[in-house]
Amino acid sequence: MNAREEGFLLLSSTLGDPNRRPLSTARLRTLGARMAAMPRPTQDRDLTAADLIALGCAPDMAERILKLLDDTELLHYYLSKAKQADCVPVTRVSPEYPAHMRHRLGLESPGVLWAKGDLSFLQMPMIALVGSRDIDPPNRKFAARVGEEAARQGFVLVSGNARGADRIAQSACLAAGGRVISVVADELMKQERTDGVLCLSEEGFDCPFTSIRALSRNRVIHALGEKTFVAQSDLGHGGTWSGAARNLKESWSPVFCFRDGSEAALQLEQLGARLIVPDDLTDLNGLQAQTLSFFGKN
């Protein structure tokens, strides 16, 4: 890691300490913009509270920033633990960080993604697949078809590694010789490195599963894909529904939902999703979204 990436980690990550208070993405962006406009000192020296106050930081915030930046021993210890677990950080200022996700999510984009696997997948064309854990047979076939077509047409499949639609699509993609990005909500360090799979995690490589993390990662899945496919959803509740509805509102990526006759699919169509059947998957590049959604966006 270079010094800029280390500085970003120091400011944006808990580094395994739940009591550590990193800066929000909004504060980081403001600080970065102000520092970029700051005249360079005539000689190398450490950043001071006076420098930060001159940039418009309140004195208590200046002290907080300096304290975060001073945690280099904790950072190097945490990075050494990550290396032992075969995990690496990809910060918002790292060259591997997906620019299209940063653009789509803006201030909601993760400050750092922890990764295990081939980072080159992050620069390849991607589609996303989401769906219910308890999934009906026709919807299972749709999820598998999405995975197979992603492999056949040269897309990395992005999903969440949950039971049901996620794993069905991921397994089908890998069986067809494709590549998978799995955004996990449990401990990244416990994921086995597997050929063809890049595992990603927010917050830290050692963070355990929580329902909040499971819901939060949905925005990453939807924003990484050029298109997002919904294999099956409950109506009005659950992670699949909330993620797809939020995507349609924020326009992170076009949403295509399996036309299974369910009320959930019909409601997602009203919100702006396009309903499709398996035969529509033969040309993923050619699929076009609805021109107008309930939210009034393309």
Image: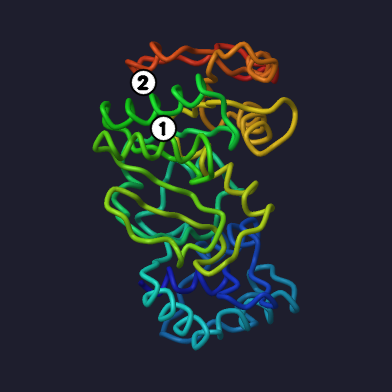
Q: Which residue lies furthest to the front in this view?
A: 137
Residue 292 image position (x, y, % from top left): 61, 12
How many C-alpha atoms fall within 10 Å of the one at disc 2: few (<14), some, or many (≥20)?
some
Q: Is residue 216 above or below residue 44?
A: above
Q: Residue 284 carries which label?
A: 2
Q: Do residues under tags 1 and 2 come within 8 Å of each other at their CB atoms?
A: yes
Instruction: Please report the residue visible at 55 percent of the width from the left and 11 percent of the height from the top.
Output: 291
Q: What residue type is labelled 1?
A: Ile
Instruction: Please report the residue visible at 51 percent of the width from the left and 44 percent of the height from the top.
Output: 160
Instruction: Please report the residue visible at 49 percent of the width from the left and 67 percent of the height from the top.
Output: 205
Instruction: Please report the residue visible at 45 percent of the width from the left and 55 percent of the height from the top.
Output: 200
Quadrant location of the C terminus? Answer: top right
- Quarter of the image where one finds residue 131: top right
Quick one: 297 or 30, which is closer to the camera?
297
Q: Residue 173 carries which label?
A: none
Q: Mark 1 points at which residue?
A: 127
Q: What residue type is labelled 2?
A: Leu
Quick one: 63 or 237, which is closer to the camera?
237
Quick one: 49 or 244, which is closer to the camera?
244
How many C-alpha atoms fall within 10 Å of the one at disc 1: few (<14), some, or many (≥20)?
many
Residue 268 image position (x, y, % from top left): 65, 19
Q: Which of marks 1 and 2 is nearer the N terminus?
A: 1
The colour scheme is rainbow
Quadrant location of the N terminus? Answer: bottom left
Residue 30 image position (x, y, % from top left): 62, 59
Q: How many labels does the image show?
A: 2
Q: How far apart are marks 1 and 2 (CA)?
A: 9 Å
Q: Is residue 111 left or right of residue 213?
A: left
Q: Is residue 43 left or right of residue 102?
A: left
Query: Is label 2 in a helix, a strand or a loop?
Result: loop
Residue 163 image position (x, y, % from top left): 53, 43
- Quarter of the image where one finds residue 210: bottom right
